[in-house]
Amino acid sequence: MTQAPDLTISGSATIDGAPLFAPLTLTLGAGQWTCLLGGSGVGKTTVLRLIAGLETGAAFAGQITASDAQPVPSRVAYMAQDDLLLPWATVAQNVSLGARLRGEKPDLARRDRLIERMRLQDHLNKKPGELSGGQRQRVALARTLMEDRPIVLLDEPFSALDARTRADMQDLAAEALAGRTVLLVTHDPAEAARLGQSIMVMTAQGLTPCDPPSAPAPRHVDDLETLETQGALLRLLREAA
Amino acid sequence: MKILSVLAATVFALAVWQAIVSLTGLPKFILPGPALVAETWWQNRWVIAEHTWITAVEVVIGLALGTVLGVITALQLANSRAARVLVQPMLVFTQALPVFALAPLLTLWLGYGLWSKVAMAVLIIYFPITSSFFDGLMRTPPGYLDLARTMQASPRAVLWHIRIPAALPSLASGMRLAAVYAPIGAVIGEWVGSSQGLGYLMLLANGRAKTDLMFAAMLTLGVFSILLHLIIRRATARMAGEAA
């Protein structure tokens, strides 16, 4: 992986002329987890998709720049709420999908290391349909890591999981993605409080920064300061609505 | 259990058939009973087998050709906007023409032999195959395409590794439909002009008031179509994502 850059997106977006989000500036710190927290429909997923260079259906006026002035979309790895595992491919094939799509030879040793790291070694040749929700998200995380990109965009990747599996996945992802510039889009204040090294609350009015807890991420689920932050975030969300 | 229920349904159908024959007292050249048809079938089994073979060859070649052509067309349509603009309306229009009306023309062009029947079978299955596979290709879950895009996949790689595999279940349902339609196409072709095949045999028997033979040939065709459908169903189970 190349050095993770700072990333700045500034601008506004409209859908069919109606404003989706007001002019805003969001900076993702290099090698840091930035959590973008917001309710449904405030355009937080649009922000993420703009950075990823994906179709948004919105007109964006502004710019997305990296601190090293290199292009952004070719350096992102993307993980969504839907694990997006190909149902006809095995776990191993899904993990090395990127190389196959680029017509490259996948680094099989690395793939196997990642699969082992995600504790999936017993499921190498299974199809996604045979796995649990948590296992499927671990495959998706392994696939994301396999891409080895300096910028990682996570669009509510854990929101469909049960509470325990979600906490496990948060720990795993925080550890595995350390050192990369990560944007986590979420509607869950608890998740933002556990994982954010920088936390932004997005509302129709714009972005409101919120101080993250002082403990290093991932924070304990029962850490008092983390719980306080979670409460403060929820209050901000409710005030905005 | 499944075999048992098929057996039960068959016995029931035969009983209803026999009851209609007995109750109405229709002469056997109008409606022969099951026993007579079975007897006629047995007596003519080699003749029927020969004609079934002819029809089967037409159907299988038609299915294979129609599937290949349909798959190629769907890929072209999915890949090129120009192809969609130019070819799609034509495809829809050809579907508005009754295939039956084309049969005499095909016989004129391709002669009395095998190929006019193959062409009928191809014509009748080409559209279901093309449109089902094309629909599947155009309905790739958008999330897969997003993911592929962030992975810098070429359109060709996306087609090959994502869109085609994601469309295989649709193609499978098109092929299953085709397995039912293809024999109809072949038999229509035989009706219009031929000297062999089950369609020819049915027409011949009908013309000579050998209604029992007509029934024997027709039932043979039905059983053949069902078997073909089952075979295609089994063959496409993996494509459709079902446990084989």
Image: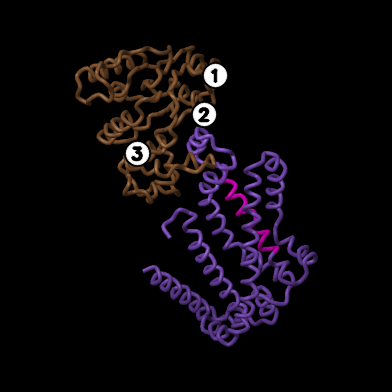
Mark 2 = which residue?
Answer: A74
**Numbered range of the magenta stretch:** B119-137
Mark 3 = which residue?
Answer: A138
Magenta span: predominant SS is helix
Q: Which mark is residue A60?
A: 1
Q: Quadrant of the C terminus of chain B?
A: bottom left
Q: Relative to B3, does residue A154 appear above or below in the rendering?
A: above
Mark nearer the N terminus (2 vs 1): 1
- Decide which of B110, A191 is in the foreground and name it: A191
Give the chain coloured purple. B
Give me the C-alpha separation between circle 1 and circle 3: 33 Å
Marks 1, 3: nearer the viewer? 3
Q: Mark 2: which amino acid? A: Ser
Q: Are marks 2 and 1 on the same chain?
A: yes
Q: Mark 1: which amino acid? A: Phe
In the rendered view, does A131 fall on the left or right side of B87?
Answer: left
In the rendered view, does A78 fall on the left or right side of B129?
Answer: left
**Residue at x 38%, y 20% (from the top left corner):** A36
Q: Quadrant of residue B180?
A: bottom right
Counting other residues with Cα less than 10 Å from the Cα at mark 3, is it few (<14), some (14-19), or many (20 or more)? many
Does B130 appear in magenta? yes
Q: Quadrant of residue B204?
A: bottom right
Counting other residues with Cα less than 10 Å from the Cα at mark 2, is it few (<14), some (14-19), or many (20 or more)? some
Q: Mark 3: which amino acid? A: Arg
Mark nearer the N terminus (3 vs 2): 2
**Residue at x 78%, y 69% (from the top left corner):** B111
